[in-house]
Image (tube, rainbow, N blue to C red):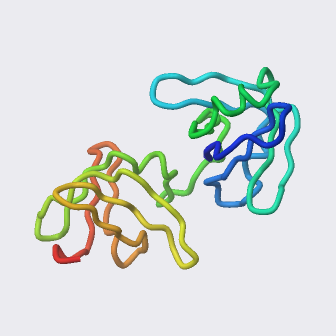
Amino acid sequence: MGRVVAPYGVFGWLKIVPDTEEFDGLLDYKTWWIGKDDDWRELKVESAKIHNDVLVVKLQSIDDRDAAVACKGKQIGVPRASLPKLEGDEYYWSDLIGLAVKNQQHVDFGKITDVFATGANDVIVVSGERERLIPYIAQVILEVDLDAKSMLVDWDTDF
């Protein structure tokens, strides 16, 4: 849902870049999970505000600059159960990470390693023999099967 990019000040505040549809969407949640890999902890949001192009947040038990510096690069998440329900053809980005991607000619492109937003549309990053950036639009994304952990795309092997 976001990531810690830097400390802010000397009292443990953090600069957060959100990955939510609405820039301030993370502010709807009173408790966040912060971590990386297998090391996550739940913290309450004590205070938060929008500051230029980041969220500035004070989380419980992060009370000084050293503790804030230790958070740099960590991810922000919220419990899945607290997220809004999606329509049938909508997916959370986290659901797409790890899906195997093939095109209509059955060429294996690799797995989705990242998803990011652009001004026009979202883009999936597929890492395999080489990295591909594929637009997440209806004309290109033909099928998503979360159970099979796969995605079928209309994408040329040369792109």
- Left of 150 or right of it: where is 17? right
Query: Where is residue 29 drawn, in percent x and y?
Result: 76, 39
Q: Nearer the viewer, residue 72 or 33?
A: 72
Query: Where is residue 65 drawn, in percent x and y?
Result: 77, 31
Residue at 62%, 47% in the rendered image? 2
Q: Nearer the viewer, residue 37 or 146?
A: 37
Residue at 61%, 45% in the rendered image? 3
Which quarter of the picture shows residue 156? bottom left
Query: Where is residue 84 drawn, in percent x and y?
Result: 66, 47
In the displayed structure, 119 sits above or below 95; it is below
- Tell me the quarter of the image containing the C terminus: bottom left
Which quarter of the picture shows residue 67? top right
- Left of 31 or right of it: where is 87? left
Residue at 54%, 72% in the rendered image? 118
Which quarter of the picture shows residue 57? top right
- Report how many numbered discs are placed on residues in the image: 0
Residue at 74%, 55% in the rendered image? 54
Query: Where is residue 90 drawn, in percent x and y?
Result: 50, 58
